[in-house]
Amino acid sequence: MTRVRLRPTMQSDLDYVLTLERDPENLPYITPWEKIQHEAAIRFPDFRHFIVEAGPDLDRAGFLILIGCRNQHLSIELKRMVVQHKHQGFGRAALRVAKKVAFDDLGAHRFWLDVKKRNTRAKALYDSEGFQFEGELREAVKIEGGYDSLVVLSMLQSEFAQRRSRALELQA
């Protein structure tokens, strides 16, 4: 498995985060935030904003944002995950660490996300990592040339525990 860790995003990381969001390779799949939104996410206790560090030297490799970390229903959202270098396993490894954080550290009952329907690579990753289809928000986001739907996926704590018992997840 690719070596990955998450560390809290610092103010000094935000130019890197904004550059990743505005990269033409990523833009079709996300809705970029303004710098002030990222600054708020770093400070607001309900959010966890992380830099993904990966590889032998643990260089910056992307970022991810969790929302709902203080949600009374214990339902945490993976709001965004952007990886700089594709096809190297960093996304899968970061997702596994994010699941561990959500369930083990934050006590989530449910970990969920939505993904643009046309983002088939990300959808395939989430499917292969045990997320279950919940529904589709038809034509929910405006894109160049029309609209795209959002696919809602989730994993429950019991499903995570079952995957862990089969050695499909990081251990506690």
Image: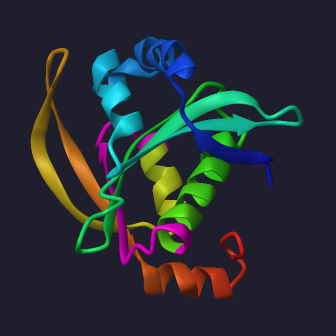
Residue 19 image position (x, y, % from top left): 49, 12
Q: Which residue is pictured at 29% across the width and 26% down the height?
A: 37
Residue extending farthest to the right is 56
- Quadrant of the frame with the C terminus: bottom right
Q: Quadrant of residue 134?
A: bottom left
Instruction: Name the residue nearer the viewer: 86 or 14.
Output: 14
Q: Which residue is pictured at 63% across the width and 42% down the height?
A: 7
Question: In the rendered image, is residue 30 in sight?
Answer: no
> Does residue 120 show up magenta in the picture?
yes
Residue 121 image position (x, y, % from top left): 49, 41
Q: Which residue is pictured at 66% across the width and 88% down the height?
A: 165
User: In the shown orientation, is residue 24 left or right of residue 67?
Assistant: right
* Color theme of the render: rainbow
> Does residue 25 show up magenta in the picture?
no
**Magenta region:** 104-121
User: In the shown orientation, is residue 150 left or right of residue 8?
Assistant: left
Q: Is residue 85 above or below residue 90?
A: above
Q: Quadrant of residue 86?
A: top right
Residue 38 image position (x, y, % from top left): 36, 27
Instruction: Name the residue nearer the viewer: 66 or 1.
Output: 66
